[in-house]
Amino acid sequence: LCCECGQFHLLLDNHLYNFQDEVDDELICHICLQPLLQPMDTPCGHTYCFKCLENFMQEYNFCPMDRKKLSFQQCHKSSLLVRNLLDKLIVFCPFKAECQQTMQRCELEAHLQNRCPGFKKYKSELQRKKNPISKGKEDPPTKVETNTPKDPEVPSGGSSLVAESSAAAVVSLGTAEPGLVNPAFEETEEGESLIQKCNYRTSLVAETTTIEIHREDPEEELGMRIVGGKDTPLGNIVVQEVLRDSVIAADGRIAPGDHILEVNGVNISSVTHCQAVSFLRHPGPVLHLMVLQEKGFSNKTAQQDSTSATNREVIHVTLIKRDRSEPLGIKLIRKTDEAGIFILDLLEGGLAAKNGKLSRNDRVLSINGQDLRQGTPEAAAQIIQTTESRVNFVVLRQPGVQLSDPVEDGSTSNNSSSSSSYNGGSPVHHRRRLDQNHYRRKSNYQKASFTVAIKKEPKESLGITIGGGRDNKNKLPIYVTSVQPIGCLFRDGRIKRGDVLLSINGIDLTHLNYYEAVSALKSNAASHSVILKALEIISLNSTEPSLDIKEQGFSWSPLWITWLGLPSYLHCCQDIVLSKGNLESWGFSIVGGFEESKGNQPFFIKTIVPGTPAFRDRKLKCGDEIVAVNGVPAIGMSNSELIPMLKEQRNKVTLTVVSWPGSLV
């Protein structure tokens, strides 16, 4: 529950309000279709919510309305007049049962904190839930364990790759796991290992770590997306994405690609996807996670690593900017002999220098949950510049180590310091593939399409909210996120949350972006009759109930495993081109493919190894489905057929993939 608006919504989403009167269209954001919050004006004359525009600009480089080229730095706050008009909109208190007051929108937060009996009752109930657990216990210590660094090097003292720490078990994988596309461990027909071909890479190193996550609100979501489960070819539960400004991002120790092995002492390495989601969504003030983290290929001898990993310290630092444009005063560089970015200097009088917790020579592991272990100064500067207020650093500090000669690739956090786009490159807008091959495959899901014909009053609304759209990051079809208890579809009862909408009154919705779909639904809802064609996806081999944790909010979205049942004609494929050197591995592992006992299964990306071409490219994600390699469909191939095809590609390969959003926990 948000303490500012008193409603349930995702951490990164805008606040929600119940407005007393209909709001003028001129004050509506055309991204979220709600009254503007922190309005931002574009040079082309359009106005959007700050968060809506910030999230949109991370994926695209044009205005959502007229598609003119646009960067976030070109936008500015709306005039004081517009902001005042929005702040004076009259809203209801969200706690209607205990409080029937109305007030200006800008007064709601103060009302909730100081005067609202409903919010006071909610807080006292929450406190009662906390007290039995925390009674008699001291607050958790703020000191970070120094023996579980995020990215340790191979410890000195011999050839062993086992760290001298009880909290971390470093595993040297002498051979790649099945499906790892890794020429360094390929064997010839005579059985001779080709490891000498890449003798500077001695092994693939992974580490199991126990991480303790603390939540002030026991019911606050963790803020990460997961894929996998024993009912999918992936098997393990894998972190696909960490959301910015979330609990997990603030902690900084979990990254995309990590495998979650245990939750609060319960082994989830062999549970179904739905069971894993249930375990991770279980409320509680403290969460204990055991994760397996791949660290990449070790490429240094024991003699080169003169300092043990146990001498290092992982430090969390939060800097708060007064506004988005305020610089932090940090000079970031790369080193010639080690991947990653380091703090060269803290500018005198700057925000970081005044804070005093960051130091020269600190290695930056992540900023706001974005993994920068293999990052660039430009990528770090972009993250800092686009952050509105809180900038969360996780750094690795090794006492007494001096910086070696930096590469001429420095960057500060000032606005003019970096022209690189987010994550080191501009988003690639791939052509649509829906009108081409759909790479048909069998599915473990039953797809039931049905038609709903309704007679209605012209002014009666449909009463549904939708998500998805082909402009979405994952290019999803349009689906129903809620059926409101008003409107003709609730009365009819056949359309349910999660249904995919195919057409309305004969107009195809499957190729439309979100705004086009909203427009089509609104314009056709004005008629006396509506004919909706929809698709319901039902798992054939899962008897588990659906996980509707957030019934009272608007943040519902389908589970990752549901999207796997989508028929192939609704897939929206994108091409990802990877390039590598002659001695490099592509750096990802795959699972799936044809098996005698299971038939045809899709191929999935299971692992992306840090420091490799797949990791640096940043477009490929764990859980992505590979449907073709260099235009050759993968359907019907076995694992042993696809891997040689990938290894034959010497310096460049084009992967055609379908990417589904992981389940939010």
Image (spheres, grey):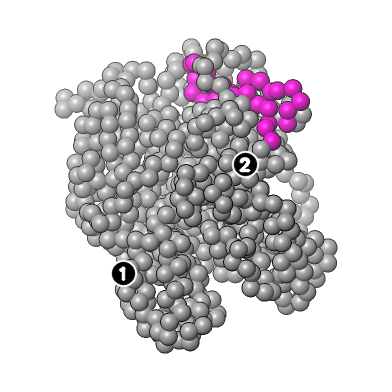
Q: Nearer the viewer, mark 2 or mark 1?
A: 2
Task: Give how far apart the Cα atoms at labels 2 and 1 are.
Answer: 42 Å
Upstream in the sequence, badge 2 or badge 1?
Answer: 2
Q: How dense is the environment of label 2, judged by Cα within 10 Å: few (below 14), some, or many (20 and up)?
A: many
Residue at numbered disc 2: 387
Tell me, yes or no, if residue 85 can be seen here: yes
- Mark 2: which secondary structure? loop
Residue at position x 80%, y 68% in the image:
116
- Mark 1: which secondary structure? strand
Q: Is 335 one of the magenta-colored residues?
A: yes
Of the 4 image quadrants, the one containing the N terminus is bottom right
| In this picture, residue 571 sits left or right of residue 111 | left
Q: How dense is the environment of label 1, judged by Cα within 10 Å: few (below 14), some, or many (20 and up)?
A: some
Compared to 185, does 138 lie above or below?
below
Compared to 494, does 64 lie above or below?
above
242 or 516, nearer to the observer: 516
Compared to 479, does 78 lie above or below?
above
Residue at numbered disc 1: 447
Residue at position x 50%, y 38% in the image:
422
| In this picture, residue 453 sits left or right of residue 488 | left
List the single residue furthest toward the right: 114
Q: Where is residue 86 in the image (x, y as percent from the top left)?
A: 69, 61
Residue at position x 49%, y 50% in the image:
63
349 or 648, nearer to the observer: 349
Q: Where is residue 466 in the image (x, y as percent from the top left)?
A: 47, 67
User: Which residues are the magenta region?
Assistant: 326-351
